[in-house]
Amino acid sequence: MIARPDRQADSRAPRPTIPPPSETVALVARLTERDRWILRMLHEHRVLTTNQLTALAFPHPHIALRRLTRLHRYGALDRFRPLRTRGSAPMHWVLAPAGAAVLAAEAGVSARELGYSRQRALAVAHSLHLTHTLGVNTWFTTLIHHGETNSGGRVQTWWSQARCHRLWGDLARPDSFGRYTHTDTTLDFFLEYDLGTTALARVAGKLHGFGELARSTGVITPILLWVPTSEREANARTALHHTWKRLPDPEAVPVATAAAQLLDAVPDPSPAERVWLPLDTTTGTRLRLADLATVWPHRTPPEAEIDQEQNWAPLAGQITLAPPPPRPPDVESW
């Protein structure tokens, strides 16, 4: 190999094969409503683990793994398992060309217009941001699963970082956007998911972008910062408050923080629990996620955001995510 090095052209990844129309038609006949929803979720959020997909759409892990393996055999999903120094990682699932072809056909566009690239889909396996992406996805997956089983809360909207960047990236770059409902309360929010590796000055500096977004759109949406430890949260709140009070209109940028460490003693931990502390609070009382909707009087009610959201949403080839399908019964046919 030293004397005869490979040529660059020889080391390129193979060009992904595009399934012929006949194979796409055959695949469509095999897909259930839940399968199609999984394809949309993977197109939106890039990668989900077996554990996450089980919590979202299956009654038991072994049923999930059997169905996902079948979708992989159909060519609808690709998979990988990251190397861990201790233990083993769950299987990670991404969208494959045949699955993208089905979504593109449904939308009446090509896979390229859909924004799908197999090379990019598989590149997440080597991404330095894989842990962060999985962390955000776990945050929402836990919130969805907890609402179904305990609190009665419901995630109506979950937009990925990529979608948020397409919509608002010239002003603000949140890690995700969500809409959470509980009884008669609805809360829209931007999620900032922190692993404790980013300089706090940079985290706080993002408030300027959110302030510009609120000024440009006239929509005031709270920002939720999730950090790993209580110590990190205390330091983050100091940095955030220093920046927040110097914004042109601080009330247009509502902020609340929470630490994952606060859930250590909770039997069924979830971001919906009483772990949130508004940045401008004077009481120090922790609130549940749904209660945050009542503490910011200047927050734009979701009903008033419908027209603005419709102006944000239309994008060429973009697929609208449907709510999760009902869970099937625990039978072997699934």
Image (cartoon, rainbow, N blue to C red):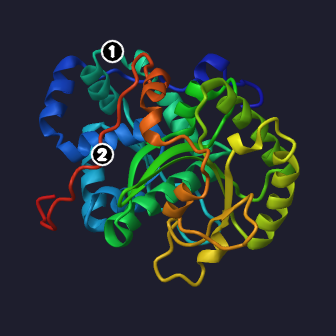
Give me the residue at 19% from left, 25% from top: 23
Residue picked out by circle 2: 323
Kind of residue at disc 1: Val
Residue 210 sits in quarter? top right
Of helix, strand and loop, which one carries label 1?
Answer: loop
- Asked whether 118 or 58 is in front, the reply is 58
| x and y percentages locating residue 91 in the rendered image | 44, 56
- Upstream in sequence: badge 1 or badge 2: 1
Mark pair 1, 2: CA separation? 22 Å
Q: Residues within 10 Å of mark 1 (few under 14, many from 20)?
A: some
Kind of residue at disc 2: Pro
Asked if one can make out residue 153 in the rendered structure from this viewpoint, the answer is: yes
Name the side, left or right, on which 121 lies relative to 148: right
Of helix, strand and loop, which one carries label 2?
Answer: loop
Which mark is nearer the camera, 1 or 2? Answer: 2
Residue picked out by circle 1: 109
